[in-house]
Amino acid sequence: MNNYSVEAIGLNKTFGRRLIFNGINFRMDKNGIFGISGPNGSGKSTLVKIIAGLLSPSKGKIIHKNSNDEIIPEKLHNHIGFASPYLVLYEEFTAWENLDIFSEIRGINFNKDKAKDLLNRFLLYKRRNDLVKTYSSGMKQRMKFIFALMHNPELLIFDEPTSNLDEEGKKSVYNIITDVSKQIIVIIASNEKTDLDLCNEILDLKQFKDF
Amino acid sequence: MVWKIFLFILLAFVSIAGIAFPIVENPQAWYQFPNIPGLEQNARIIFFHVPTAWLTVLAFFMSTVFSFKYLKRKDLDDDLKAYASAQLGMTFCILATVTGAVWAKFAWGSFWSWDPRQTSIFALLLIYGALFALRSSIEGEEKRATLSAVYSIIAFVTVPFFIFVMPRIMKGLHPGSAEDSSAGPVVNFQMNSSMLLIFFLSLIAFTILYFWIWRISYKSLIIKENINKQLIRG
Amino acid sequence: MLTKAIALFKKDFHSELRTRYAINSLAMFIIVAISVIMFAIGQERISEGLTGGLFWVVIFFTAMSGLSRAFVSEEERGTSLTLQLVAAPSTVFTGKLIFNIILVFCMNTIIALLYAALFESFVINNFGLFLLSFVFGNIGLAISSTIIAAIIAKAGAKGTLYPVLSFPILLPLILSSVQLTLFAIDGTSIETAKFELAIVVSYDVIMLTVSYLLFDFIWKD
């Protein structure tokens, strides 16, 4: 059973002196899919980066808890799976090597069976020994899902999950998202209607624009 | 307003006294300075050169303090305060370097001779220069504030090394340095009370001047930022 | 934490073997710098004091040409976000530091050997002292250039800014190291050089502490 929870208290982010959003509060403690929507430039990516601990908010706090123990920022990265178009993998290595390297840097054993399984599910197994730089953008995007899922995270964050994907790729991604959302919390930031249709709950960033 | 007039009078007095008070062999009256062998009339620079050097260090220190504050509180105003102080520090650093070099031409025979203090002030000049080069190369305000704060703290940590390293590696010529036998440590021994009085008055006046300019300059920077913000939002 | 940092170092090492970016430019730089000095000297025999200084000139500029790579390559390719997702800041810094320390040791050993072979006046009389100052000097050089490289990478300005920012920070280290190298050439005893050695060691310790304290701020946008 997953006892993970994410709570945002009064999140506010300004870049320099420009306000991105203000006064965001939410709490996620049930497994399921949680959507973040909003027009371009409304701060969707900024918000998911803050949730993932990649950016710090200007005001407010984000609290990750695992069975009521608060997770310290230095350890947060091992609880989170993150995939987005702006994430870049090491292109001078093959897909297989990438997964191996990331497991080692995380300090966990490289689970070959899991890697095989995920590569199969995302239709990349045949290309596993090719350098990532030879991949098409859709293949790279699918590879990022494998990167996000490899270490059995308790929270999955997808920023624009279906960009660069064809119909077939989208279908496999949707299948996996609905699959994992039975066990863990999934956050999707997107404008695609089909992405947002998966969500149990949607947070619209338009309403957090004023002081 | 009152203290501005006070500062004006103080600076005027220090300037006149520092330049005009006569240097005599045996000072009797309160306005007479003693003759320091090897320095003579050159000694007068102490009233102007030493305060600028002191402000260079003070401004750097204040800049580091506010850099530290910025990293703690992430308030962009702290960054502007640090920046304003660094700008002033750079100005005083140039003044101290130039006045020192001109004085050195007459006292030591050459403008520059890599005396430990000259090397130290040169290092400070490099640090200030590097800080401004770094600032001007970064676009985003927050990134600029963070990176320059980090850099000025790293640079500040190296300053004590100059104090310990330089005198060992180079021979000192500067009045007050350990190897200086001819003029002796000026501040401690050969200044009489009237000279000391003017010297410390000068230090105080310059310090007030620094805080005053610093306040004006960071306030104007903050106002400028606010106008920019209104332009962006409006 | 160290095993994770070593894993990161191994990644950089393999990546370097495949792209050979830093190694190639460092090797070429060493050759160019030393040959420029040789041409400038011509037939003249230069003093021991000057070789000691020139030794560190070459080391400084070679370091400036290659050591920023550790962070700039991550930032250029956009993989620093990925690294943030797999490792804590301290792990990243340790990994990059190990990489740079090894790079500095390799490059400085080559420079020292070339100097010994090419310059008649570069004769070390107190080898123990030279080794001590070489080791601690290299570590200090690696620490400072790694943290400045992190700043440069985030500043988005490569090339020219790196030596500008590094020089004032490295100045105390370089001055003491030049002095120690002169002592080693003169054959001064370690006892006499204690003060300079202490400065270099304390420089290493202080820079290491400050770097770890401040790296979090640099690394997180």
Image (cartoon, coloured by chain):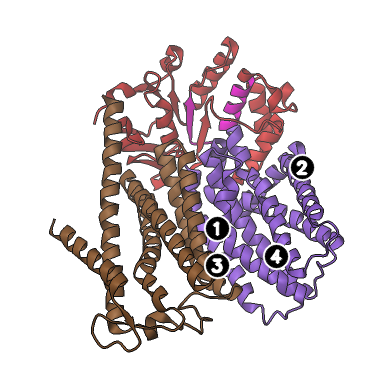
Chain colours: A red, B brown, C purple
Residues B103 and C135: in front is B103
- Residue carrying label 2: C24
Q: N-terminal of the two: label 4 or label 1? A: 4
Q: Is residue A155 magenta?
A: yes
| Distance from the alpha carbon under mark 2 to that under mark 3 | 44 Å
Residue, disc 3: B110
Q: Which residues are magenta?
A: A139-159
Position of B165 relative to C165 (above/below) = below
Question: Does the image show residue C202?
Answer: yes
The chain holding disc 1 is C
Q: Nearer the viewer, mark 4 or mark 1?
A: 1
> Is residue A73 at least partly visible in the picture?
no
Q: Which mark is drawn over residue C169? A: 1
Q: Is residue C21 magenta?
A: no
* Above or below B115: residue A43: above
Q: Secondary structure at mark 4?
A: helix
Residue placed furthest toward the top: A167
Give the residue furthest to the left: B2
Amino acid bearing label 3 = Ser
Front tag of 2 and 1:
1
Q: Nearer the viewer, mark 3 or mark 1?
A: 3
For the residues labelled 3 and 1, say whether their Cβ atoms are less than 8 Å apart. Answer: no
The residue at the point 44 percent across, 84 percent down is B37
